[in-house]
Image (cartoon, rainbow, N blue to C red):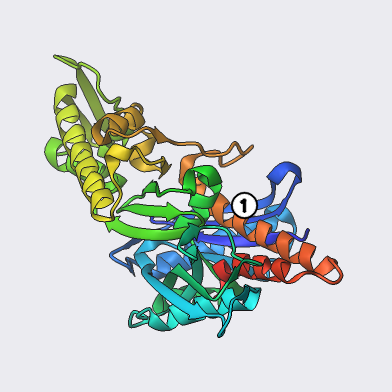
């Protein structure tokens, strides 16, 4: 299977991975590049020159390490630059019942897309069936070969902001690199992190970034809920900087050293920088950090409820991201505050083995599996129709 490259635009860093598939669904990374930049807020980059420099740096590092020239990349799309539209549709197969074919599923998806409202300034990224309905029976399986006269289904349509693609492509043009496809960062993460059996009913993915936290609802292999909350790792550091009257970089160090749920009583900590030092009460740090953490959990719980998921049903919930989640005790704090059994199961990787690289590895995993399905299909002779529609279903994720 040929290697592939992905470009992951995160909220504080850009990651380029160049890799290939290994046995037992593994991934071999031939080259990786990571570069920090100023990030984005509310669907807008804070400094495009910073983004430009980071993209060039990340790709150059991946090329140098792999000793390969990267000519195209699959681009991840953060929820901040995405829009979700759910649309149901029903088609008739004719005047009399017959067995459904792949073309019928394609027609159902196309009709559903026509009913969906395309947000202004956005283009379609991918369309993914959530479930199908045949003779009153709902199923996530492709209804190929079932005899019926009517086929219904719910389809998830993900759109990407045109300006986002253009901004990244402007930088890539200078490097002679093309965007081969766009992938929802949330969907790539979810398919990699959450087992298929746990996606039969709605599952939850929480990605804590630097400036915001993204909450996604996943059903089968489709996103059915998407929200962005205006709190991320930066806000914990910013609160500490303001409350303790110290520079942001010193507050960031204090945040990283903090451990949740300890009894600090009269203990103190000395915060040092080049201009001097300051002694602060650990109870003050605890008060500031845990107040912001409680606010974040409250907003997450409300958003999950607003998207139609009952927390009392204990949905499968997975965490990814960095910053706040890298703090000791943060996972247990969030479990207790949300009342959910939360998992943070980033698959082991020999390098970059951290939850803040989930979106990058999720995208690379998704692209490699899709390429593998395509190569397998093309290598077969007289491929049955259901094979082609299965491939089409996979490739629908990656329509640019």
The furthest residue to the front: 96
* Crowding at mark 1 (Cα within 10 Å: few <14, some 14-19, many 20+): many
Q: Residue at x 14, y 43 (%)?
A: 242
Q: In this view, does 335 lie above or below 181?
A: above
Total numbered labels placed on residues in the image: 1
The furthest residue to the right: 381
Q: Quadrant of residue 336?
A: top left
Q: Residue at x 38, y 53 (%)?
A: 217
Viewer-closest of 209 and 249? 209
* Location of residue 79 in the rendering, given as x and y in whole percent from the top left corner: 38, 62
* Location of residue 359 in the rendering, given as x and y in whole percent from the top left corner: 50, 52
Q: Which residue is drawn at 23% across and 54% down?
A: 306
| Residue receiving disc 1 | 32
Residue 38 visible: no
Viewer-closest of 46 and 21? 21
Residue 66 visible: yes
Looking at the rendering, in which quadrant would you find the N terminus?
bottom right
* Location of residue 138 in the rendering, given as x and y in whole percent from the top left corner: 47, 59
57 horizontally vs 20: left or right:
left
Q: Which residue is drawn at 49% across and 79% down?
A: 91
Secondary element at image label 1: strand
Q: Quadrant of residue 122?
A: bottom left
74 horizontally vs 190: left or right:
right
Viewer-closest of 256 and 82? 82
Q: Quadrant of residue 314?
A: top left
357 horizontally vs 1: left or right:
left
Q: Is residue 333 above or below residue 248?
A: above
Looking at the rendering, in which quadrant would you find the C terminus?
bottom right
Viewer-closest of 309 and 288? 309
* Location of residue 384 in the rendering, given as x and y in whole percent from the top left corner: 77, 69
């Amino acid at each position: 299977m040929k290697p592939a490259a992905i470009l992951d635009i995160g909220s504080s860093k850009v990651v380029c991975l160049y890799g290939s598939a290994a046995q037992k669904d593994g991934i071999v990374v031939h080259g990786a590049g990571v570069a920090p930049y100023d990030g984005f807020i509310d669907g807008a980059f804070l400094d495009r020159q910073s983004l430009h420099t980071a993209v060039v740096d990340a790709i150059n590092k991946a090329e140098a390490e792999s000793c390969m020239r990267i000519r195209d990349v699959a681009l991840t799309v953060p929820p901040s630059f995405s829009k979700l539209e759910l649309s149901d549709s029903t088609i008739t197969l004719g005047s009399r019942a017959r067995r459904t074919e792949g073309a019928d599923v394609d027609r159902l998806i196309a009709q559903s897309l026509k009913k969906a409202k395309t947000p202004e300034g956005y283009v379609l990224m991918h369309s993914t069936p959530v479930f199908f309905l045949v003779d009153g029976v709902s199923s996530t399986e492709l209804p190929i070969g079932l005899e019926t006269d009517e086929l219904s289904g719910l389809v998830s349509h993900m759109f990407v902001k045109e300006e986002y693609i253009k901004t990244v492509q402007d930088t890539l043009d200078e490097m002679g690199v093309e965007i081969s496809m766009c992938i929802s960062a949330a969907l790539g993460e979810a398919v990699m992190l959450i087992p298929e059996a746990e996606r039969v009913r709605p599952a939850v993915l929480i990605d804590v970034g630097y400036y915001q936290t993204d909450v996604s609802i996943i059903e089968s292999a489709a996103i059915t809920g998407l929200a962005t909350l205006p709190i991320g790792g930066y806000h914990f550091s910013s609160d500490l900087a303001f409350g303790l009257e110290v520079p942001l970089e010193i507050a960031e160090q204090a945040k990283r050293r903090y451990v949740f749920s300890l009894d600090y009583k009269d203990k103190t900590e000395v915060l040092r920088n080049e201009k001097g030092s300051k002694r602060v009460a650990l109870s003050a740090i605890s008060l500031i950090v845990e107040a912001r953490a409680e606010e974040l959990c409250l907003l997450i719980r409300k958003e999950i409820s607003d998207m139609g998921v009952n927390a009392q049903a204990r949905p499968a919930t997975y965490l990814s991201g960095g910053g706040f989640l890298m703090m000791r005790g943060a996972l247990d704090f969030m479990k207790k505050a949300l009342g959910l059994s939360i998992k943070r199961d980033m698959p082991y990787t020999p390098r970059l083995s951290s939850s803040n690289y989930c979106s990058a590895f999720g995208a690379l995993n998704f692209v490699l599996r899709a390429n593998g399905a395509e190569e397998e299909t093309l290598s077969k002779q007289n491929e049955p129709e259901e094979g082609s529609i299965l491939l089409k279903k996979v490739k629908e994720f990656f329509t640019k």
